[in-house]
């Protein structure tokens, strides 16, 4: 059998992940390993469960005030038309916003648990599928640990967890899109037949178009990752799978570019550019490019100095230490790992800079402010995944050059628990603030509804701010937005600043 034929045979046979029932455990994959690895997944899973439970205190604010009456009066299709013709052209974004706004306040409360489970499920499925495709077996529970840790770091190790996880409008635009882009990998990793490969190509095409009309920033990250994979495929992908991988990349690129064309040429996108006027036309101006670079440097420094991200390296090291090939041997370090070592970070840095560049004309100096960290999430997931990959390479190196790996495993296990402590404290504090706001919001909601029912046309509104979210009468009462949307929601003509009402 030739080497190529042997590679094809290996890639097409079912691969285990240490989780298939009835299989004889591989070396290091016994019940004891499965037990302690599964136990390590509990802290990040507990973070996700607690954060989802705290979601019951979420109440509308900022853009949500405007989406609620729009969906109530015109339905999801009405919101899609509003986005396409008037606001920004993001039709996929409008569909997801309409999906939670259709349930009004309850949709906001359920959104955190639904989105959190979705992100976890996608990352878990991608991890399992990638290990199977690569012919790597691991202890039961390790794929869940990897997915849970990446999910926790992505969602909760942020300067403003509320805007990343709890604010549905921001999550739909910047948190969910990277996870949905990862979901497009699953058909690719599972494709083994002609029909499966055709389905994977169709998913890549449609996913690219969907993401492009959901989030411009995530679309940029997708384009760069696909281009990098396509350009480096000759050295990184084995020849039997190379042709299909290239077709898949081309399908993803074509879908993303087609969706981007729909977005850019939409009346809503044109109106948005006109609304910001000269600011958006200065996108490529030297001053704008330099300012974008400066702000991205600030974002990068803040990101790489956030020590909790070492948790991603730790689970990666565990992958390298515990993963085996089907024959029980230690997996080989990729022959072209130096190429990966510079291509991955370069793709991250370039995509992050481009995302900052297109956001800067609108957000100006606030683009690097921690309160606007939701703008970083489009490329933050790529950063965390790269750290996991770097950890896996480090784990393989330790395994090959260090006689005993017990100490390395113990250190990684301790880090996996330790990095969850900070987010846990932050979530508890946020829960207290959200609960206090929810109680005041519910009382005010009853008052405004009763007043509208009694025929009142103008009523006072008290600002209820959480995590630097926008409310009417900000900046000392100078900013009315989204006061008009609040009035529409309650059927009033106008709301006034409650703090200035005698």
Image (tube, helix red, strand yellow):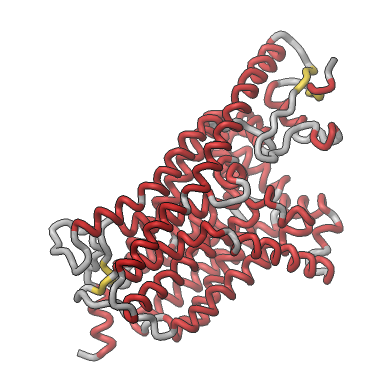
Left or right placement of residue 299 versus residue 111 in this view: right
> What residue do we see at 79% from left, 35% from top?
474
Vertical placement of 359 versus 136: above or below? above
How far from the left and from the top, in percent, is residue 37? 30, 56
Q: Is residue 378 left or right of residue 329?
A: right
Q: Position of residue 429 (x, y in %)?
A: 57, 37
Residue at the (27%, 80%) spot, across then down: 8
**Residue at 67% from the left image edge and 19% from the top image edge:** 444
Nearest the eye: 218 or 438 = 438
Q: Which quarter of the rendered picture does the C terminus lie within?
A: top right
Does residue 133 appear in the picture of this structure? no
- Front position in the image: 376 or 28: 28
Q: Is residue 237 visible?
A: yes
Q: Residue at x 75, y 20 (%)?
A: 492
Q: Position of residue 378 (x, y in %)?
A: 59, 58
Between 208 and 446, the residue placed more toward the observer is 446
Give how far across and how far down residue 389 sits, in percent.
44, 70
- Quadrant for residue 435, please give it: top right
């Amino acid at each position: 059998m030739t080497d190529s034929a042997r590679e094809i045979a290996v890639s097409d046979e079912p691969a285990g992940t240490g989780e298939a029932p009835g299989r004889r455990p591989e070396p290091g994959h016994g019940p004891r390993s499965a037990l302690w690895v599964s136990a390590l997944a509990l802290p990040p899973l507990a973070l996700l469960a607690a954060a989802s439970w705290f979601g019951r205190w979420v109440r509308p604010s900022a853009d949500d005030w405007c989406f609620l009456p729009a969906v109530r009066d015109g339905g999801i299709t009405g919101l899609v038309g509003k986005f396409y013709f008037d606001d920004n052209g993001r039709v996929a974004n409008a569909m997801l916003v309409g999906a939670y706004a259709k349930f009004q306040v309850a949709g906001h409360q359920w959104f955190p648990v639904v989105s959190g489970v979705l992100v976890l499920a996608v990352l878990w499925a991608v991890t399992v599928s990638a290990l199977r495709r690569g012919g790597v077996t691991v202890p039961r529970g390790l794929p869940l640990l990897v997915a849970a840790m990446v999910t926790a770091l992505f969602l909760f190790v942020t300067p403003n967890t509320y805007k990343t996880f709890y604010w549905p409008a921001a999550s739909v635009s910047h948190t969910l899109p990277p996870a949905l882009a990862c979901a497009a990998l699953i058909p690719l990793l599972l494709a083994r037949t002609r029909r499966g490969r055709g389905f994977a190509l169709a998913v890549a095409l449609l996913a690219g178009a969907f993401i492009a009309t959901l989030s411009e920033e995530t679309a940029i990250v997708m384009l760069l990752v696909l281009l990098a994979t396509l350009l480096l495929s000759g050295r990184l992908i084995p020849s039997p799978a190379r042709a299909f991988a290239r077709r898949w990349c081309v399908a993803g690129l074509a879908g993303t570019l087609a969706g981007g064309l729909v977005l850019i040429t939409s009346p809503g996108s044109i109106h948005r550019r006109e609304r910001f006027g000269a600011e958006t036309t200065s996108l490529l101006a030297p001053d704008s490019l330099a300012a974008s670079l400066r702000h991205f440097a600030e974002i990068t420094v803040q990101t790489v100095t956030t020590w909790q991200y070492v948790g991603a390296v730790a689970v990666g090291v565990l992958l390298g230490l515990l993963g085996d090939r089907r024959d029980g041997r230690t997996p080989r370090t990729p022959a072209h790992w130096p190429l990966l070592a510079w291509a991955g970070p370069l793709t991250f840095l370039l995509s992050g800079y481009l995302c900052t560049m297109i956001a800067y004309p609108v957000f100006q100096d606030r683009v690097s402010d921690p309160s606007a960290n939701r703008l970083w999430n489009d490329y933050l997931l790529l950063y965390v995944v790269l750290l996991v990959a770097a950890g896996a390479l480090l784990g393989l190196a330790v395994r090959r050059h260090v006689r005993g790996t017990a100490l390395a495993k113990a250190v990684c296990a301790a880090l996996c628990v330790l990095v969850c402590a900070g987010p846990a404290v932050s979530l508890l504090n946020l829960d207290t603030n959200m609960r206090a706001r929810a109680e005041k919001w519910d009382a005010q909601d009853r008052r405004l509804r009763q007043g509208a029912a009694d025929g009142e046309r103008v009523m006072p509104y008290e600002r209820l701010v959480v995590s630097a979210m926008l409310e009417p009468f900000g900046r000392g009462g100078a900013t009315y937005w989204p006061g008009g949307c609040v009035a529409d929601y309650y059927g009033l003509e106008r709301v006034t600043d409650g703090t200035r009402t005698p």
